[in-house]
Amino acid sequence: MIDLVAHLLAFAVGTVVFLSAPLLIGYLVRPSKPGAEKASIYECGEEAIGSSNVQFDLRFYVIALLFVVFEVEVVFFFPWAVIFGTTMQLADTRLSDESRIALSEHLLSEPAGSLDLERSISAASALQLGWLGFADLAVFFGVLLLGFAYLWKRGDLEWVRSANPERNLHSESLAKPYPSTVALGESI
Amino acid sequence: MDKAIPEIAQAVWLITPELLLLGVVCLKFFIGPFLVSESGQAKPGLEHRWGSLALAALAGAMWLWWDQQVVTTPTLGPFRLDAITWYTRGLMLSAGFILVLLTWSQSGAGVAAESQACLLAIVAGVNLISAANDLAMLFLALELVSIPTYLYLSLPRRDELSQEATVKYFLLSMFSSAFVLYGFSMLYGATGTTNLTAIQTVLASSQSTMAPPLVLVGVVMVLAGLSFRVTAVPFHFYAPDVFQGAPVSGAALLSFVPKVAGFIALVRLLPVDAHAASAGLDAWTMLKPVLWWLAVLTMFLGNLLALIQTDVRRLLAYSSIAHAGYLLVGLYAGHEQRVAAPDGIGALFFYLPMYGLMTLGVFAVLAAAGSLQKPIATFEDLAGLSRRHPALALALLVLVFSLMGLPLTGGFLGKVHLFWAAWNLPGDGGQSLAIILTINAAIAAAYYLKLIAAAYFEAPAPHWNGGAVESSSSSVPAAIASGLCAALSVAMFFSPSWVWGLINGSF
Amino acid sequence: MNDFISASLVINIVLGAILGGCSYLIYVERRLAAFIQDRVGPNRTGPAGLFQPIADGIKLFIKEDVIPGHVNLFLFILGPSIAVFTTMLAYAVVPFGPPDQIQFTLMGMNLDFRFIIAPQIDIGMVFIFAVGSLAVYGIILGGWASNNKYSMLGSLRASAQVISYEIPLGMSIVGLGILTGSLNLERLVLHQAEQGFWGWNFWAQPVACLIFFVAALAEANRLPFDLSECEQELVGGFHTEYSSMKFALYFLAEYTHVILVSLLTTLLFFGGWQFPLIAEVDSAYTGSALVKVGVLLSKAFCVIILIMFLRWTLPRFRFDQLMGLAWKVLIPLGTANVVMVMTVKHFELPSWWMFPLSLGLVAVVGVLSVPNSKTRYGALGMAGGRTRIAADGVLPPGLGKRIPM
């Protein structure tokens, strides 16, 4: 474990050095002639109007919310997938004894060589665990897809959605000055 | 390994009523959007179908609950089914009926599916809190109560007041969830397990008589987080604003359901059993002064501030804070073997259904007398109710008497039990608390009588023209609910053995 | 001590290879673009223009580094650094050769050389996703700190895009986890290599391969997914205000990401270092390890060339199509794929079932995506053909979202 962390740390330090070296060398070598023109905001030659910290579209926020929900679900999938995969390998009765012991040790997080055939997971109980995992994930997927269907039907996945005045809550009052027969070309 | 798999697989059969409810929730969320147009409009009358489906689901869950056997042996699985679980299920499923009726009249056809589904999810969540035998499961159950609550509050009405109330509740509720989660992680860190039974075993077997600091910090954090749910002072401040802004059904839900959730979780987590506590740890004796002050402050602040309210819903919010104080008295008394029955927890469990009947009933009267868009807000709106709706006014009278704790209502018995449970405690703390409880009941009478006075002795305000006169069909379920609550409040006084049967796990 | 030296040897080789590889990939890309567009491309600096990357590097060093006066200096420098750092860090768990240990003597020291920086990490793929998702900070910090509207819009788009495509990216790996029973990259490769050519995950998981490749391209902000820096709309996107070396860092990050994506595609789906006859699990001839490294790198290079061809072949997506592709096509497809693998494994059907089943999945999605001639929308709700959207995203009231054109 310490070994792994040391490797990762060494790599991180190495990366930082590799990154900062060109920045530093460049800092020493390159010319520096600042000017008012150079320091201005790049707007294709125009003077920039207003702050750049504009109010942005609420849809980005909705995407971020959906992301949090689904990303958490995906994170739950990873350990499940590993355990389910190992279990289904164990459920195979043709598995050799050595691999059964090795896989059991891996699944139960026991140190290598600590289990014998007696105490490793039998094919029958692996199959039982497999059924449990199968049922669990079937329910999990069911609920996930249900929420997904709900979002989809409500139109939350549609990027152009908030442009749709029909979904607007005060649609009646807003829509009045624009009769629905207005031709497309006139109103845009 | 070979033993653990069947135990996990068996756990599913312990929560069949909740599975049924959650199945119906899924059904509603799945079909709901297909019956609503893209602009959120639906055929009027759709809410009747969804309401009936919710009632049917509750009835089915009740049937399953009735069939279940209480299992007393402690397990290492994620769920358990002991007397407390059995009691909570009975309580919440019955309260669910009243809340469904309230929701029925308070949500339009467009959002009926979602509102009823959220309500069923909340009921299932409270049941799961009592069934959880694991910190992770307990937290998930707590969130299953709070997350649908946010939706439930925001769905019926989309005006600024309602949105503000929802956002307030949302932010503060998240905050309290974080507290609870911190507390849980401390408990897990101190004991090395998330299983509640195993945690108790670990704590009981520890050698020292002092609780480890980690456990104490954890318990205090959990207490703080759950105090938010039960609206105990100083975690009460959101209640008046939210009650005022939220639709009546939402306020009714908030006045009762989070309290059940919070108190059940507290009973599960705190070492309320003095006997078990003496076996190992001192945590309970350290916590007792905290609980004493919590109860006293909550009672006084709730009742005194209620006196000066002009808005009926704010008044009821402070009244619900005061009642949280009364319930904390029961928690303070705890399990005490030396006291003749009922002890503190018994009195707490007796008072919860009484309180549920009266608070849900009063809100049902408000829902039936007003409408979703023009709710009953001030005393003027309530004035002359006896002339406009004599039946509703009578229900209000009975329910308010119950809130005051007058005889011939269940509220009286509830307060008496709480009083004796505290009075019989060894030491001064209990008796002083019992006296404070009585003083507070007297203070409360003043503002409750203002409600009666407005309904019976004042002429209807000339400007009042909204309410049930126009929207009579939508207020029928709420009127039924209020009548049911009033009738049951009186019935409980004459045959309290129903409730005691529920508490003791059998009829 | 010896461990430390061999570790630093590996680290230096990896970092050097990435930096060198990136600069020459730019050269390759320019030559390829020239070939596709019937131009000549860089050919003046050195034989066939081979010294062009070096000249570019020197230019980037000695160019003035303009830091505009209106930026948030700390975040402005932090942005590109994070972008490169996080992308590089992912290489820690990527094996670039077989799992053998090579022992050799260098200046009297016996060194163990392994073709990976941090060997045997069981959470390998999760680590890559975890580190990779931090890369979005590099873009959003750079864009925000620039205090420029173009940068701001570019970074917003990029963040929405990157987080959306992270979900199908993760889902595509779940199937492999079930098949292998591990997310350790070395085990994933070994599992394929043991079964030979037909054991490559591509044959069992063609859909997952497609999803992974598409989502990874989107993560790398490459065309056809480069909406965060589309020149026609946003000047340079999130790096509009950057110049000199910091600008180069963003490019370094992009190409590092491309190499990473190619390596991962090869390792996960195309058998890694395994190749029939010349590089099998049991080939033990002298230099077999180096041949395996060569096989792996050649495969990865093919994927890189494919990515470059895509860039000059496909037009850019529109933003609603981009989001629709992630949420309405890739995520349901990824979910269906996981269910498919789960079912096949659980009922112990032969693995070849997965290939036709995967093709069936793609066919179903394809049929659902065919746009209806009237609404121009497929059954999945993806816009086909032209859909009119007002420039600011707000249509006047009274106009629905589906406008038949």
Image: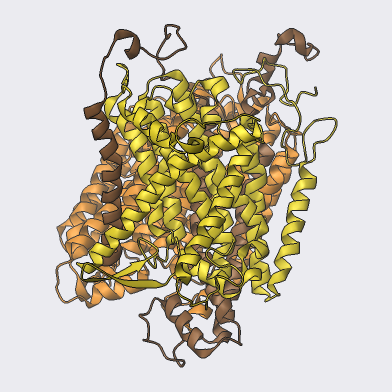
Q: Is residue B256 left or right of residue B117?
A: left
Viewer-side residue, B137 vs C239: C239
Q: Say whether residue C267 is left or right of residue C322.
A: left
**Residue B499 or A73: which is nearer the viewer?**
A73
Looking at the image, is C179 positioned above or below residue A49? Answer: below
What's the residue at 39%, 32% (across, down)? Answer: C55
Chain C drawn colour? yellow
Say above or below: B447 vs B85.
above
Residue C274 image point, x, y percent: 55, 68
Residue lying at 57% horizontally and 54% vertically, measured from the top left: C171
Residue located 46% across and 52% down the image: C129
Residue, far bottom: A118
Q: Position of residue C378 (x, y in %)?
A: 77, 38
Please state which of residues C125 and B495 is positioned toward the viewer in this rendering.
C125
Residue C164 seen in the current view: no
Q: Chain B's colour?
A: orange
Q: In the rendered image, which quarter is residue C37 located in? A: top right
Colour assigned to chain A in the rendering is brown
Say left or right for C186 vs C108.
right
Residue C145 point in image, percent of width and height: 35, 26
Tell me the residue at 76%/23% (across/down). Answer: C403
Q: Tell me if residue C49 can be seen.
A: yes
Give the residue at the far right of this rendering. C373
Is B139 located above or below residue B99 in the figure?
below
Residue C214 drawn above or below residue C294:
above
- The front one of C239 and A110 is C239
Q: Quadrant of residue B298?
A: top left
Q: Position of residue B129 (x, y in %)?
A: 45, 59
Q: Is residue B250 left or right of residue A161?
A: left
